[in-house]
Amino acid sequence: MEYIIVIFFSYISGSIPFGLIITKLFTGKDIRKIGSGNIGATNVLRTGKKYLAIATLLLDIIKGYLPVMIAKHFFPDLIELSALIVFLGHLFPIWLKFKGGKGVATYLGILIALSLSLSLVFIFTWTIISLIFKYSSVSSMFSSLTVLVVATIRENVIVSIDPSLLNNYDIILLLFIFFILIIFSHRKNIFNLRNKTESKIKI
């Protein structure tokens, strides 16, 4: 029963398409017919409404954060399951025929719930890479890889210092899955990058 409860509230939370809802409410437009067609904050920014993009970003972060924190408090043994289902809910929402967003903001919300230090690594790396290359997709993929590498190094260092200390390789596996899913969700962006047709961030 606990598995069903966690899967249910995690998926429902992750599947809420805030970008689509907010854009429809405030502009009357379907975000799926604008720019890249993605429902995330980066594409919402292409509507020219920065406040809508910021709202989408924050809400997508929150929808990743809340269910994982609920699981951490009430179902501590199912934290990783909650995190994964939330992310999958964003990528494959049933309401949009399983065609969701890239999952980056939701991933950040999950990270904040799992590890504040790793979320700061992600934010720092994303910011630096985006300032250098101006591509949200490159920043997102590189940052998720950086988080995976840093987490792996950290766990191995902890074990090497004292093998008796509790380590959490489940988190490493989870972060690896997230990285693969982020690469998958950015497959069109990778194609555009190879063909030099990828849109740059415009603030």
Image (cartoon, rainbow, N blue to C red):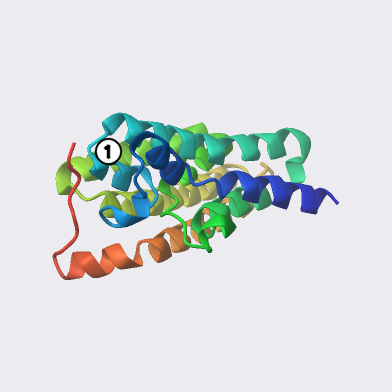
Total labels: the figure holds 1
- In screen coordinates, is 86 left or right of 164? left
Residue 164 appears in the picture as rendered: yes
**Residue in the picture at 69% in, 35% down:** 70
Residue 163 in view in this figure: no
Q: Which residue is mark 1?
A: 127
Question: Is residue 138 shown left or right of residue 41?
Answer: left
Give the vertical position of 53 relative to 159 (above or below): above
Q: Which structural element holds mark 1? A: helix
Residue drawn 36% across the image and 41% down it: 28
Q: Amino acid at mark 1?
A: Thr
Front-most of residues 22 and 140: 22
**What residue occupies the far front of the structure in this picture?**
28
Question: Which residue is rendered at x = 62% and y = 42% of the image?
Answer: 162
x then y, percent, for residue 15: 56, 50
Residue 110 in percent (x, y) is at: 54, 42
Q: Residue furthest top?
A: 51
On screen, residue 4 versus residue 134, left or right, reads right
Vertically, is 162 above or below 149? above
Q: Residues within 10 Å of mark 1 (few under 14, many from 20)?
A: some
Q: Is residue 121 above or below residue 149?
A: above
Quadrant housing the C terminus: top left
| Residue 19 drawn at (x, y percent) | 41, 43
Image quarter of residue 73: top right
Q: Is residue 162 left or right of residue 151?
A: right
Query: In the orientation shown, which residue stands out farthest toward the right?
Result: 1
Give coordinates of residue 45: x percent, y percent.
Answer: 27, 40
Frontmost residue, 159 versus 44: 44
